[in-house]
Image: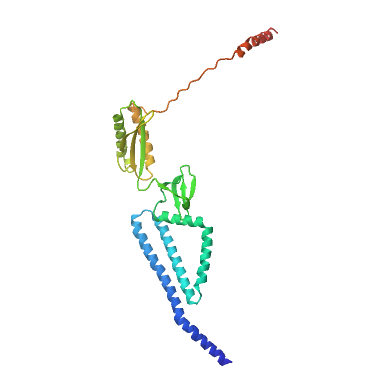
Amino acid sequence: MDSQILDGINNAIKTYGNWLLTGGLRILFIIILAFTSIKIINVFIDRFLKQRAKSDINNSRLTTLTDILKMASKLIIGILATMLVLGEFGIELGPIIATAGVVGLAVGFGAQELVKDTISGFFILLEDQVRVGDIVDLDGHAGLVENINLRTITLRDLSAKVHFVRNGNINTVTNMTRDYSSYVFDIGVSYNTDIDFAISIIKEVADKLYKESEFKNKILEPIEIFGLDNLAESSLIIKARFKTKPLEQWAVGREFNRRIKLAFDEKNIEIPFPHRTLYVRAEEPSQEWFKQIPSEIETIFKKLQK
């Protein structure tokens, strides 16, 4: 009996010993290779981040992309390593892959909106379409970008309302503050105005604004006057444009409008506005009303006699 037990132990040692020297070493090699691959990929991703960070001020975007790439590399390498290890244990991978495929299809069908949002968010980040701090219009939702993630973009509008826009629902991204901004003016003057004189006043006011220290750092270039743009119904429209730093176009525009109004008033240049004339038709009193007057007077007279 003891000899049978010893023989069984010896056979087990030989069997598992041989497996450890072959399959076990292969499993160890697979695990080491997986961890090494993850480390190497992370190093390359970090180097990519440092190189881009020197020329890209939006480090939050690069950090988000780096985290996504690291997570994706870990997931892919982890799945491949797990499949290889299971194969070394003699487990058939065919049924497992088939089951995983069915489960993946079911989850993907149920969470297709989430998948759509995530993929769209990844490409929005990858293509650098939107940054935190930008003023954007996302299919009618406009505001300041406060946060970007793989699923949503958070906007805050001028009245402080917060909009959460799903990335999968975004068809058109209009970025109003990318690299530089512009404030376009449509300045109306009356038809009696000397158009060349009006343009010279606009240029004079704009040049003075451009040279002031408060606005010199906001305005990138002198005003660009396109000229007489439209013969409107009641005014001549002069179109012009300021090129400004991002987010500064509205401050520049408001101050320029104020100064133009003061300059036009000083030079007697009329800024037309709509006039409306109202005609009130007086209705003739009805004859019935005249007939009632004598009887009413008679009634009042009788009351006075009493």
Quadrant placement of the C terminus: top right
Q: Is residue 78 left or right of residue 192?
A: right
In this image, 193 relative to 28: left or right?
left
**Residue 214 in view, yes or no:** no
Question: Does 8 sit above or below residue 300?
Answer: below
Of residues 6 and 283, the one nearer the viewer is 283
Is residue 8 rendered to the left or right of residue 293?
left
Residue located at (51% from left, 63% from top): 104
Picture coordinates of residue 194, whole percent (x, y): 30, 27
To which quarter of the image does residue 43 belong? bottom left
Given the current orientation, which residue lies at the most extreme right position? 306
Q: Position of residue 275 (x, y in %)?
A: 43, 25
* Residue 64 picture location, percent across and down: 42, 58
The residue positioned 47% from the left and 71% from the top of the image is 83
Nearer to me, 56 or 197: 197
* Quadrant for the N terminus in the image: bottom right
Q: Position of residue 225 (x, y in %)?
A: 31, 37
- The front one of 292 and 259 is 292
Can residue 62 be spotted in the picture? yes
